[in-house]
Image (tube, rainbow, N blue to C red):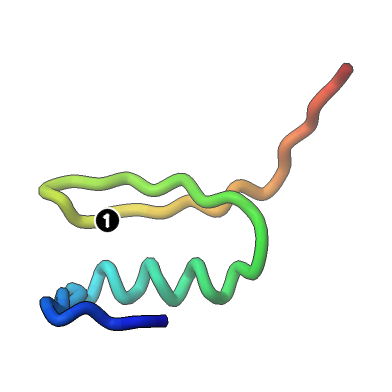
């Protein structure tokens, strides 16, 4: 992954979210944001679709 000349520092909350996403592998996460920061993330466990 290429890094731009203007690096962006992640906050601890953002770093935790990135770790959660990487550990998930595949699936769906709902992210709640307040003051431009993630405050809660919910991993969606089950979804049922009927045709």
Residue at 41% x, 54% y is 41
- Answer left or right for 48 relative to 13: right
Quadrant, the N terminus:
bottom left
Image spot of residue 7 (x, y percent): 15, 79
- Answer left or right for 23 relative to 13: right
Residue at 79% x, 32% y is 48
Indicate the quadrant where residue 26 lies: bottom right
Report the residue marked by disc 1.
Answer: 38
Residue nearest the viewer, comparing 7 with 23: 7
Q: What element carries label 1?
A: strand
Total numbered labels placed on residues in the image: 1
Work out which residue is located at the far top of the displayed protein and give it.
51
Q: Is residue 33 above or below residue 12?
A: above
Image spot of residue 33 (x, y percent): 25, 46
Residue at 72% x, 43% y is 46
Q: In this view, does 17 lie above or below 41?
A: below
Badge 1: residue crowd in 10 Å (few <14, some 14–19, many ≥20): some
Residue at 53% x, 74% y is 22
Q: In this view, does 37 lie above or below 18?
A: above
Residue nearest the viewer, comparing 13 with 8: 8
Q: In this view, does 22 lie above or below 49?
A: below
Image spot of residue 38 (x, y percent): 27, 56
- Answer left or right for 8 relative to 44: left
Residue nearest the viewer, comparing 3 with 32: 3
């Amino acid at each position: 992954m290429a890094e731009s000349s203007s690096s962006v520092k992640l906050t601890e909350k953002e770093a935790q979210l990135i770790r959660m996403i990487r550990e998930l592998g595949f699936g769906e996460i709902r992210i709640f944001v307040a003051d431009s920061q993630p405050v809660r993330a919910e991993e969606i466990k089950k979804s049922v679709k009927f045709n």
